Image (spheres, helix red, strand yellow):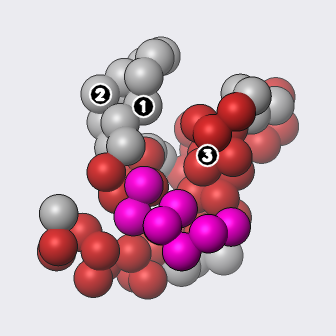
Amino acid sequence: MQPEDLQRLVDMEMPFGKYQGRRLVDLPGHYLGWFAREGFPRGELGRLLALMYEIDHNDLRSLLLPLRRRS
């Protein structure tokens, strides 16, 4: 993980699926859990979704609040 990855979670939108257009930070936990079970996409998106899953799973979403306020 790079420090700028946290800002990417706040800025980047989901490019496909049921939650297309929603920022990664706003994806629901059950959706992230589905990816964790079924497999994350390849590349940067998959890496960021896995990071967001870990943040959500460990109840650390509040750590992203300061970054949301800057956006």
Which residue position is annotated with label 3? 49
Q: Which residues are magenta?
A: 1-8
Residue 56 on image: x %, y % = 57, 65
Is label 1 in contact with label 2 (beta carbons under 8 Å)? yes
Residue occupying image coordinates x 47% and y 16%: 17
* Residue type beneath disc 1: Met
Left or right of 18, for residue 60: right
Residue 24 on image: x %, y % = 43, 46
Question: How many numbered marks appear?
Answer: 3
Q: Quadrant of residue 42?
A: top right
Decide: is 66 above or below 56.
Answer: below
Residue 39 on image: x %, y % = 81, 31
Decide: is 23 above or below 9.
Answer: above
Q: CA distance from mark 1 to mark 2?
A: 5 Å
In this view of the protein, which residue sits in the foreground, 48 or 32? Answer: 48
Which residue position is annotated with label 2? 21
Residue occupying image coordinates x 61% and y 46%: 49
Q: Earlier in the sequence, mark 1 or mark 2?
A: 1
